[in-house]
Amino acid sequence: MTRIKRGYIARKRRTKICLFTSSFRGAHSRLTRTITQQKIKALVSAHRDRDRKKRDFRRLWISRINAVIRENRKKIYYSYSRLMYNLYKRQLLLNRKILAQIAILNRNCLYMISNEIIK
C-alpha cells in the first residue's frame, strides 16, 4: 500500500487566518492557536464597536445642537430637549445629524427654525 500524504486543506485554512492577523504583534501573528484566538477577539470587538460608533455619534450630535441652542440666550431661553419636543409637536422631520450640521455650518438657520417653532 502506498503512503498517503496529508492534504493541504488545513494549511490553507491556517494561512488564511495568518493573513488576517499578519499585522498583529508578537505571537498573535505567529502561533496558530493564539492567531485563532486573536482573530475571534478582533471580530467581536469590531462587531461591538459598530454599535458603539452609532451611539457615540448620536451623543456628539446632541451635544453640538444643545451647545448652539443654549448659546443664543439673548433672544430666547431654549434647550435641546425643548427644541426636539417642539420639532416633534410640529411634525418637522429633521434628524439629529442634519440639525447638528445646520448648527455648525449655519447657526442663523437653526435660530430661525427654533424661532418659527416657538411661534
Image: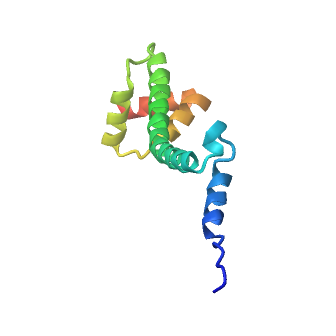
Q: Quadrant of residue 51?
A: top left
Q: Is residue 72 visible?
A: no
- 9 on left or right of 80: right
- The image position of residue 25, as x and y in percent, is 66, 37
At 50% from the left and 44% from the top, the residue drawn is: 41
Q: Position of residue 111 (x, y in %)?
A: 49, 27
Q: Is residue 87 above or below residue 40?
A: above
Q: Please, is residue 78 above or below residue 59 in the view? A: above
Q: Position of residue 39 (x, y in %)?
A: 55, 49
How many labels were placed on the picture? Answer: 0
Q: Nearer the viewer, residue 91 or 30?
A: 30
Residue positioned 34% across, 29% down in the render? 81
Q: Tell me where residue 106 sits by quadrant.
A: top right
Residue 101 in sight: yes
State the quadrant of the N terminus. bottom right
Where 70 falls versus 102 (above or below)? above
Q: Quadrant of residue 16?
A: bottom right
Q: Residue furthest bottom?
A: 1
Q: How is the image coloured?
A: rainbow
- Residue 99 lies left or right of residue 15; in this view the side is left
Q: Residue at x 62, y 40 (%)?
A: 27
Q: Nearer the viewer, residue 112 or 97?
A: 97
- Taking the view exactly as shown, the residue that stands out farthest to the front is 1
Q: Residue at x 43, y 29 (%)?
A: 115
Q: Quadrant of the C terminus?
A: top left
Front residue (pair 5, 89): 5
> How far across and how far down the image is residue 80, in percent?
39, 27
